[in-house]
Amino acid sequence: MHPTPDNEQTTAKQADGCGMDIVRGCQQGDRRAQHQLYENCHKAIFRLAVRMVGPQEAADVTQQVFLQAFRKMDTFSGRSRLETWLYRLAVNESLQHLRRMRRWQQPRLEGEPADRGPKHDEQTDNRELLDLALARLEPELRSLFLLRELHDLPYRELADATGTAEGTVASRLNRARRLLQEHLIDLGWEP
Amino acid sequence: MDCSKVQPLLSAYCDGELAADDRTMVAAHVTACAQCSRRLAAFGGLSTMVKGLATPPPPADIWTQIERELDADVQVVARRSLGVWTRSTRRLAALAALVVIAVGLGLLATSNRLGVHPRDHLARYLDQFQEDAEKAQRILIANYGAKAIDLEEAGRRLGYRPVVAGRLPDGYTLEAVYAVQMPCCDFMQYVCRRGSAGMIAIFERGDGHSGCLEGRPAIAACCGGQRCRLAQLGGKLVVSWNMDKRHLTIVGVRDVDEVEELMANFGKG
């Protein structure tokens, strides 16, 4: 729908090509297969984690996602793509991480809809506002929205990755977009 | 099709997920309706903004950390499946056996000297914990004023971030937090569930003193390079150690491996 920056196209390509030979190798504990899977998918998982738990915690979450994947590879049934299964682990790990941290983090990236002064770098301002607005979305909606926008998952895979009924994906995405827009406007964004 | 029917479909239309008939109807409506057209354009604008967000590169050492954990997994499996014990595990097992004997022979003799009578409420709590953690908790509530609080409150009372905040190992969930006023001192207590396999209770105080939780006979041990005290409690262990200014006691630990795992986990910065 929209062109992606070059670096993100690279990430998308890396997310492909996790064939059954890699799965079998990982299930047998083959370190080369595990490393190959990591090389293919870690940037996409890290990217999701950054937007879910913030850049400071994203490395921990990424590490846990792959450890869980390697330890539970026997449970991968092959009904979904391996990448979708990894996204599911990433979403769950991010949500658990946020629950653990919830009472101890100051509201992350919160800001005031203050007078922002002259817009000398509107693009940077908008990105900061977007980060703030994303942080305000409830985590389950945020994960759904990010998997759609950043990782281009179709609705069927979004349902698998987030544990959402496929029939409700559209309405939840609708709500996420609407809320995100409201948060942006509250924070001073001018469409 | 009016706006009230079209607007819920705009996301799916934007994402190319509508069936052909609905897609045609929405397209026709959006062409004619300024409001819905603006909403659709806003969704598109959001998408562009999000796709433009920069992400820092992942740290280079993530894979190194993963390999380290995978290597540790391999060693644990090898140790358990082949029955090969490391020297430290053999030493701890021998010490634990001594504890069993010491407790059996010495409980009555030493308990008065250490100020813990078998019938006191704490002893009853520890005994009851193995069978029924909830029933055991009622002993603390009734006799030590154990009051359910949340982690924030625990942090305020301690004056620092509780040890379990953001640091429980995988598979453990925090079920409840209590402030407990024992005769000697106040503790924060964290009741945690271990997957679907039982409970542990973690007691924390911030002045580095053990207070009355170490009234049972215990042995000094070294777990994962950290000094601790271990006591046998029915089929489970009680472990206590100092970590910076915290004193921690965990009740209901399964075995020495879990002791090491928990101590290593909480010891991470």
Image: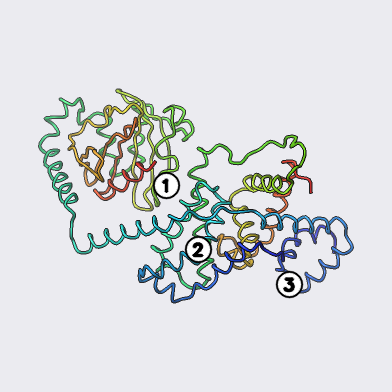
For residue A25, side relative to residue A13 (left or right): left
Q: Are marks 3 and 2 in contact (CB under 8 Å)?
A: no
Circle 1: element type:
strand
Which of labels 3 and 2 is toward the front?
A: 2
Q: List the residue tagged with mark 2.
A: A86
Residue B19's mark?
Answer: 3
Specify the amino acid type for callout 3: Ala
Give x and y (percent) for residue B160: 43, 30
Task: Give the quadrant of the N terminus of chain A.
Answer: bottom right
Q: Earlier in the sequence, mark 3 or mark 1?
A: 3
Q: Where, by quadrant of the figure, is residue A187 drawn?
A: top right
Q: Chain of mark 2?
A: A
* Crowd tier of the residue under label 2, counting other residues whose Cα lies within 10 Å: few below 14, some 14–19, many 20 or above: many
Q: List the residue tagged with mark 1.
A: B173
Specify the amino acid type for callout 1: Thr
- Mark-to-mark CA distance, 3 and 1: 43 Å
Badge count: 3
Nearest the camera: B225 or B147? B225
Circle 3: element type:
loop
Circle 2: element type:
helix
Q: Chain of mark 1?
A: B
Give x and y (percent) for residue A21: 44, 76
